[in-house]
Amino acid sequence: MKRILAQCIKEIAQFRRDRLTLALAFLLPFITLIIFGFAIRLESKDIPLIVQDFNRTNLSNSYIERLYATNQFIPKKWSGRNPIHDAIDKGIAKAAVIIPPEFSRDIQAGRNTTVQILIDATDVNNARVIRGTIQRVTNFFMQDHGLLPATNTITARMRLWFNPGRLESLYIVPGVYGVVLWIFPSLLAAIAMVKEKEKGTILQVYTSSISATELLLGKGLAYLLIAIVETLLVMGLGSIIFQIGIVGNPITLLLGTLLFLIDSVFFGLLLGVRSSNQNAAVQGVSLIGFITSLLLSGFIYPLNNIPFPLSLAPNIVPARYYINVTRDAFVRGTGFAGVWFDLIMLAVLGLFFFNVSRRVLSRMQLPN
């Protein structure tokens, strides 16, 4: 135990003397939180919409006003021989509504009328939002003017659970915690391990009486403590800036965060053991750590959208399980009943990373 603590104290002393590493540990996670927290938005807003009204009556104007009253569309105007197609082809507008000349006459006569909708489906998700919004506006407009029955046999009363205000920050920010706390602790640990190789001090370790287990635990403890400080900084500022708080049992968040930070540190040590220089270590964290935590964790895209066999990869991505823990703690609040499996998987993956690192380092170390 004394050797582990001595190694831990040495690592923290070296960490404090390196200003670049200090910035990497505390400044960059905060910047990443701000960028991801404000920049990533899944809800489409301010969609440019162009309307060509050949009817120009109070009824057609009322329909157009209802489209813009959704606050999802912003009006766009374009002139030319074929303004509708030109605006969509050139990206000026993402959708177009063409109201025919007989629009109001057909409605007043009780006849069917056709409103043409053109949608830029380059972004499929955006196209679905546009289509659904215009369809809802059209149905409401028809019902408001007596073109649909005012009463229905079946009435669906909907209630939004957990996030009734539909705040995207409640979904995005807990996911950002998983990405940030996976990248930076693992990056610091990987760089620290590689520095031992570049400076040649790893040879002293190989020939000393300290075992591979003691070396990894000593370094891991040092960077776990640093990662805990990072977590307090990131989550504290995130709660203040984005106005989110814990709604469930805080014990699951505390336990899950501790296990996740251990995973992150041991993953970094594993990459450091396997890398020959800092560039290789940083690239390993960027390619393996960042991409998987961003794209294969459920942070932005649902995991069930990933096709087989790539859908098997998220099962060994710790960020996938930790993001479930954070979203439960900050949004759902179900506690152990909802995240017990995620906690077990975080513990299993941490043991896996540590054991692989220990085996690799033991093979490098000279026998005593």
Image (cartoon, grey):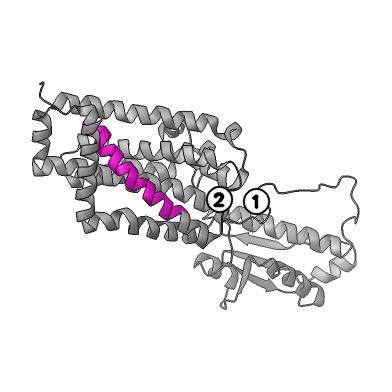
Q: Secondary structure at mark 2?
A: helix
What residue type is disc 1 on? Answer: Asn
Quadrant in which residue 142 is drawn = bottom right
Asked if residue 20 lies in the magenta stretch, the reply is no
Q: Does residue 170 sit above or below 215 in this rendering?
A: below
Instruction: Identify the main secondary structure in magenta.
Output: helix
Quadrant in which residue 280 is drawn = top left
Camera sees residue 40? no
Residue 346 location in percent, x, y? 43, 32
Q: Quadrant of the N terminus?
A: top left
Q: Does residue 63 sit above or below 329 in this rendering?
A: below
Q: Secondary structure at mark 1?
A: loop
- Compare marks 1 and 2 and give the one earlier in the sequence: 1
Identify the residue position indicated by label 1 in the image: 163
Residue 262 location in percent, x, y? 36, 37
Mark 1 touching mark 2, by CB under 8 A? Answer: yes
Circle 2 packing at 10 Å, graded few (<14), some (14-19), many (20+), is many
Q: Is residue 60 left or right of residue 5?
A: right
Residue 209 location in percent, x, y? 13, 27
Camera sees residue 23? yes
The residue sitting at 59% across, 55% down in the picture is 127
Q: Is residue 172 left or right of residue 285?
A: right
Identify the residue position indicated by label 2 in the image: 171
Residue extent of the magenta highlight:
215-235
Q: Does residue 181 sit above or below 256 in this rendering?
A: below
Name, please, the residue furthest toward the front.
2
- Front residue of 275/139: it is 275
The residue sitting at 60% across, 43% down in the picture is 248
Q: CA distance from mark 1 to mark 2?
A: 9 Å
- Front residue of 221/256: it is 221
What residue type is disc 2 on? Answer: Tyr
